[in-house]
Image: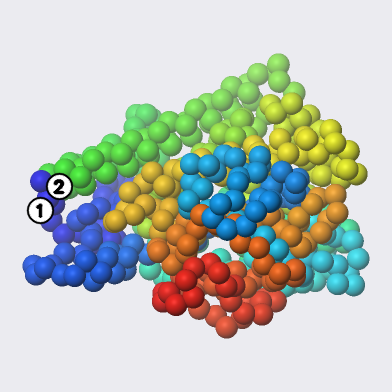
Amino acid sequence: MSSTTKLSRRAVLRGVGTAMALPCLDAMLPRSLFPRAASVMAEEVRSATPVRMAFFYVPNGVTVAKWTPTTEGAEFVLPPSLAPLAPVKQDLLVLSGLTADKARDNGDGAGDHARASSAFLTGVQPRKTHGADIRVGVSVDQVAAAQVGQSTRFASLELGCDRGPQAGNCDSGYSCAYSANISWKTPSTPMSKEIDPRLVFERLFPNHSRVEATESRVRRDRLRKSVLDLVGGDASRLRHRLGANDQRKLDEYFSAVREIELRIDRSERDSREDLASLAKPAHLICPEGIPRDYGEHIRLLCDILAVAFQTGLTRVATYMLANEGSNRSYPHLGVPDGHHDLSHHGNDAEKQEKIAKINLFHMEQFAYFVQKLNSLKEGDGTVLSNSMILYGSGIGDGNAHNHDELPILLLGRGGGTLEPGRHVRYSRNTPLNNLYVSMLDRMASSVDRLGDSTGRLPRLASETRAF
């Protein structure tokens, strides 16, 4: 059964206080009354499924020996820290040898953590200050957002698990804003991240009327209703106009949204119970709405971001799993020590093993996200194949505080413009920002230069491929 209607890619379901975006359905893809060459139809499908980009940041570097593949090319073996990516290895580019030169001191002395995060997406040396005169550069995500964000409800999304202060001295004379942000709209304006899953969810399914939205939230809370209940009538009418494949996609999408709602409700309930209990030390009580389990917090935001990409609410995102210099402990991994403290391991084998456990934990959460994207069918591919998802840190080895040999991964196929499934090694001191210039090309946001870039990064795909 084929779809009986043609839908706009921007179609939404409406209810009182709610506007709910839809995933990419077959009914949104190009159709023709006349037969066309497969190559022409494939190009039309690609144009209907625009490319997304996301940047995941982890602090304090990695245990390099357990991270970097020993061989190059397509026959590389995943090292221990990358093992969770085995199911999506054919969608993975491991990029070795890239450098964030502007995270180095370059005469500014101590402050590697602040520089690592602030220069990571900008390629610009941050001004050393802990006053109001902060200055770094415009980040790659915001360059893309300025070009493609007009076609989506949100130009970009900024997510994270640590709030972090936006002022004060956090690292050897550098403002806390540098350590707590990787996204910068202007050289002096960071894009503060949201850490509360409820607030992110409410942003994704709003109504233009603030009064209606507030009334909707109150009504849903009182009646324990889902956002799906509010758009139920519109959804039912749409289902009758869709083919069987689109109906299945819609059902899967609704199930995912409902699961997110239930998990948010559960985390809020747990938070209230913690606050009402005197049995738990205050420092172990999470803020309301924040899951008490760190892994669940990461995954819940990942699922919300997946929905935002799936529905075209945004094409650009950043996600800090923790602020740079984070000293979070990981008792559930048998690591009660602080992350930052451990990163200064002094080549102590036991500390290095603990860092490796933290690296593996972060990678497991990231693998959860990219596998989620890979499960979402879209056109003749998946949301992952139509994305570029970067994972990395502005520090290579936390003990050395080096900013070359950065741990950089790129997942996805960029809508067919990348050739993953390889480990590619670049010459020493190749600017990380060369990669970003090449990624912007694939977002139809081309620039001649970004930060300290010196050109485009080769060997990401066939040099003759047009995009």
Q: Residue at x 47, y 62 (%)?
A: 419
In this figure, what is the number of numbered marks? 2
**Residue 63, how many percent across, how many down?**
76, 45
Does the residue at mark 2 contact the one at mark 1 (Cβ under 8 Å)?
yes
Q: Which class describes the residues within 10 Å of circle 2: few (<14), some (14-19), or many (20+)?
A: some
Tell which of 225 and 109 is nearer to you: 109
Rendered view: 280 above or below 181: above
**Residue 449, how many percent across, how many down?**
61, 81
140 horizontally vs 304: left or right? right
The colour style of the image is: rainbow
Q: Is residue 62 visible?
A: yes
Judged from this view, the residue extending furthest toward the bottom is: 448
The Cα atoms of the two marked residues, 2 and 1, are separated by 7 Å
Tell which of 78 and 318 is nearer to you: 78
Q: Residue at x 64, y 46 (%)?
A: 321
Residue 272 image-quadrant placement: top right
Q: Which class describes the residues within 10 Å of circle 1: few (<14), some (14-19), or many (20+)?
A: few
Quadrant in the picture for the C terminus: bottom left
Sequence order check: which comes first, mark 2 or mark 1?
A: 1
Q: Amino acid at mark 2?
A: Gly
Residue tagged 2:
243
**Residue 309, how many percent across, how many down?**
42, 54
Residue 46 image-quadrant placement: bottom left
**Residue 33, how many percent across, how many down?**
8, 67
Residue tagged 1:
4
Asked which secondary structure carries label 1, the reply is loop
Judged from this view, the residue extending furthest toward the top is: 279
Q: Amino acid at mark 1?
A: Thr
148 horizontally vs 449: left or right? left
Q: Residue at x 20, y 45 (%)?
A: 245
Q: Residue at x 74, y 26 (%)?
A: 334
